[in-house]
Image (spheres, rainbow, N blue to C red):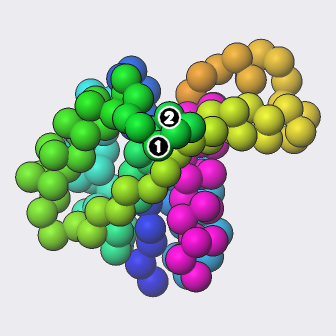
Amino acid sequence: MPRILAIDYGAKRTGVAVTDPLGIIASPLDVFPSHTLEDFLKAYFQKEEVTKVVIGMPKNTDGSPTNATPLVQAFINRFKKVFPSMELILHDERFTSKMAFDAMLAGGMKKKDRRNKGNVDKISATIILQSYLESNP
């Protein structure tokens, strides 16, 4: 069964999450240096069937673009050129970093692990994917 993959793209690090083969549950996959993401995706798409990719789109609370929006848009443009047949969905990522930190806190994650920004990125990608799944049953 095909999977759905989510990306929380950042200047330095990118969190990636994926659904189970039935496309029901979102789980964190890993965090990658952003400059290596394209190579990871090429390899992942060869070994796993992925039907669509959800990318978190950064927005301010009023819906306007953030300072990170041009960076994400540049990645989206590149993604479309490298993977032209892959369905790409933009999903609002407002508050996902805060929600990820709160989830780590509620889950009892140690302070040392909460300081690891890669953990926040992975969990943010998972929240983006779960939010997409809930809004598109």
Q: Which x, y percent locates residue 4?
A: 44, 68
Q: Is residue 132 located in the magenta-colored stretch of the structure?
A: yes
Asked if residue 129 is positioned above or below residue 29 in the image, the reply reads: below
Q: Is residue 36 visible?
A: no
**The magenta segment:** 119-137
Residue 109 located left or right of residue 48: right
**Which corner quadrant of the image does residue 34 belong to?**
top left
Closer-to-camera residue (62/93): 62
Magenta part mainly helix, strand or loop?
Answer: helix
Does the residue at mark 1 contact the one at mark 2 (Cβ under 8 Å)?
A: yes
Looking at the picture, which amino acid does disc 1 mark?
Answer: Gly
For disc 2, the marked residue is: 60
Describe the element under mark 2 as helix, strand or loop.
Answer: loop
For disc 1, the marked residue is: 63
Residue 29 located left or right of residue 64: right
Q: Identify which residue is drawn at 37% across, 23% down.
A: 67
